[in-house]
């Protein structure tokens, strides 16, 4: 079964609609990626700064022999392996991972030569913020693409309808009908009788 297009629609209208759709999708994707990356960097950066600040406090407490806070520990079981390896090697670092089944920002550093002191900061709100942002970007992009496509299709329809009418008149003139006219109301002289 073949889809029947309106008489005035032709390859120009289809090409214009495809072009508008591709450009809208590309623009929506570009803007969505830029917003996602920016907000993700900001959210992760804030969590990282907080985790490193707590790691600094925990390191000072550990070195002073004080009791560690509830969010700090030496070689905790949930600490991501690559972060543990980094800390045991003598460096400090951060990483988003999990703690008791929820997202956490981990910060770890070396203690006692071959152990890792780590703190975790709850990252659930940050993860929810990013997930909500991604949903909002998808819905707003779909809405913008649909609205632009509808407006673009309407505009292209008006242009292609006039072009098809003009082409039909040109074919009649080339066939010998020298009295053929486009009958565009905008081209009529208001002072001239019809």
Image (cartoon, rainbow, N blue to C red):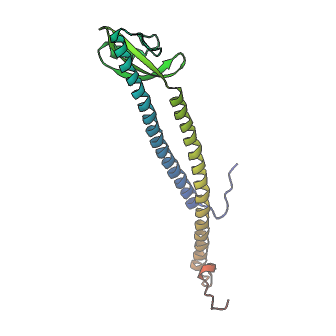
64 left or right of 166 in image? left
Rendered position, 185 above or below 36: below
Rendered position, 147 above or below 191: above
Picture quadrant where residue 4 is located: bottom right
Q: Nearer the viewer, residue 124 or 167?
A: 124
Q: Nearer the viewer, residue 176 or 191?
A: 191
Picture quadrant where residue 184 is located: bottom right
Residue ID at (59%, 66%): 160
Residue ID at (58%, 67%): 159
Rendered position, 41 above or below 64: below
Image quadrant in which the C terminus is located: bottom right
Residue 150, x across and y down, in percent:
62, 56
Rendered position, 143 above or below 132: below
Residue 112, x across and y down, in percent:
31, 8
Tally the numbered discs.
Answer: 0
Picture quadrant where residue 5 is located: bottom right
Q: Nearer the viewer, residue 17 or 33?
A: 33
Residue 27, x across and y down, in percent:
49, 49
Residue 72, x across and y down, in percent:
43, 15
20 left or right of 65 in image? right
């Amino acid at each position: 079964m073949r889809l029947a297009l309106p008489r005035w629609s032709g390859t120009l209208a289809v090409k214009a609609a495809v072009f508008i759709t591709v450009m809208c999708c590309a623009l929506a994707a570009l803007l969505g990626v830029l917003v996602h990356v920016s907000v993700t960097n900001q959210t992760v950066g804030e969590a990282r700064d907080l985790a490193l600040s707590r790691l600094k406090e925990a390191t000072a407490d550990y070195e002073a022999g004080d009791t560690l806070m509830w969010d700090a520990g030496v070689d905790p079981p949930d600490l991501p392996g690559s972060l543990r390896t980094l800390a045991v090697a003598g460096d400090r670092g951060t990483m988003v991972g999990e703690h008791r089944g929820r997202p956490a920002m981990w910060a770890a550093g070396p203690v006692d030569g071959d152990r890792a002191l780590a703190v975790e900061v709850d990252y659930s709100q940050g993860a929810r913020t990013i997930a909500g942002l991604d949903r909002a970007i998808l819905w707003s992009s779909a809405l913008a693409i649909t609205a632009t496509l509808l407006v673009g299709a309407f505009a292209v329809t008006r242009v292609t309808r006039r072009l098809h009418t003009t082409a039909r008149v040109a074919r009649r003139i080339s066939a010998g009908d020298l009295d053929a006219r486009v009958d565009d109301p905008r081209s009529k002289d208001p002072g001239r009788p019809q």
